Image (cartoon, rainbow, N blue to C red):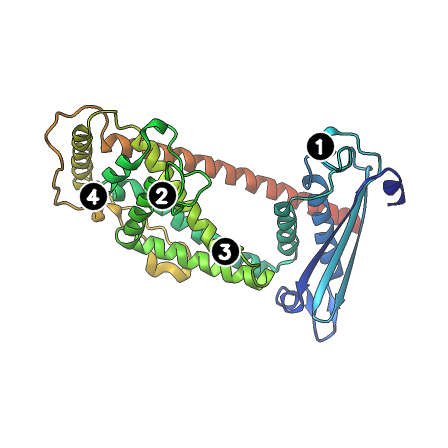
Amino acid sequence: MLRSQENGNNIHELAFSIRGDWLVKNNLYDPEIRMIDQNKLKHAEQEVAKTLINKGFNLPLGEDENDVVWFGVIHQDTDHLNMHLWFAKKSQETRSEMVKQEGKYKGQPIGVIPLEVIEQAKRQFRKQLMSSQELRRHQEILKGVGGFKKEIVETAPENLLNDRHAKAIKQIYDALPQDMKGRWQVGNAHLTAGKGKMAKANQLTNQLLDDLFDKELKPEYEGFKSLAQEYDAINIEDQGLMHKGQRKWSENKEDELRKRLANQLYKHLAQIEDTSLNDIDQQMSELLSHVKQKNKGNNVDKTKLIASPQEKNLAPKSPANNVNQNSKHIGDQMPVRGGSFNKISRLWRQDIRAETNAERQFLRNQKKVEQENAQEEYESQISRRL
């Protein structure tokens, strides 16, 4: 540390705190004999230090594995466990990515670790310390949320592209800024935000999704929200009360779901050709007719996606049964030109399949990495014993 100070480098300090009842619940502390699992704590501390040193900056803090010095202290006072970390680069920092390029402190090493990296390290620390039972509980809920989300995304085309929603979709199309066609996106704003060229279309789309979640996809949406809110409760158990203005995990997940559905709808509405308003009415009318005929002939049962044992009563129902069979065409005045809801639905489904395949490949790769890491850890433990 002294050498680091002589070279003008920053000494980074971070503190983590865990409640005593959390330690007991995860089998890390036995209150009867007043013993704590020091080995597991030290291993978690090493992993957290590695994350912060290698991922806390634009580049790894050290230029090689011997260019960083760090140490940590774990102590327990009253009903909390506290971990303090200090780490610093040994050699003088000269890399431009790691030095401030402007302002009052130009030329000095970057000293601030992004908050999201610190939060990631804290989550990693807790995960390293969790009991297998708690980890399974987390995984089951996350798996359930993902299952309901997948079902909602996959069944959205049939449930949105039917007669009941035709008027609402026509209003959304009319509200979309035509000078931005091909670039229609929700962006960073919430669907309910009242500013920007996309504001009106976003608000109308949010109302459409409210209607969809209240009718055709009510069981799936209620299952999604219920499990996501259950995960909120787990986060409070693990991390304590939320800071002022901090959004809940369930709120972020719902925003992600709504934005994804909105962006998919906008992307495929862009397939409607630029014609008169009456012709757009006719295109949409033909689309509805195609979707209705397709769904009449589609009697294939879908496998129900049940997220968790607690949510069996919320099992999704087949979207084919949700389509209104009493079609009433709108705007039949003009001849049909250009795309159709059938085309939009087909393209939408192709995108969903591509995304699903990519997600599956990612999960397979992650599982392989986890297995390799577990094998390395096992071999390391055997080596230390020998």
The amino acid beneath tag 2 is Val
- Mark 2 secondary-structure assignment: helix
Residue 178 placement: quadrant: top left
Badge number at residue 299: 4
Badge 2 is on which residue? 153
Q: Nearer the viewer, residue 305 or 164?
A: 164
Q: Nearer the viewer, residue 280 or 103?
A: 103
Numbered disc in front, either 1 or 3 = 1
Numbered disc in front, either 4 or 1 = 1
Mark 4 or mark 1, which has the lower sequence index? 1
Mark 3 or mark 4, which has the lower sequence index? 3
Residue at position x 49%, y 36% in the image = 361
Numbered disc in front, either 4 or 2 = 2
Determine the CA span between mark 3 and mark 4.
40 Å
Determine the CA span between mark 1 and mark 3.
36 Å
Q: Identify whether 125 is placed above or below 205.
A: below
- The single residue placed furthest to the bottom in the displayed view is 32
Mark 2 or mark 1, which has the lower sequence index? 1
Across and down, in percent, residue 88 comes to 80, 43
The amino acid beneath tag 1 is Glu
- Mark 3 secondary-structure assignment: loop
The amino acid beneath tag 4 is Asn
Determine the CA span between mark 2 and mark 1.
46 Å
Across and down, in percent, residue 263 comes to 38, 37
Mark 1 or mark 3, which has the lower sequence index? 1
Badge number at residue 248: 3
Across and down, in percent, residue 280 comes to 20, 30
- The single residue placed furthest to the left in the displayed view is 333
Mark 3 or mark 2, which has the lower sequence index? 2
Badge number at residue 102: 1
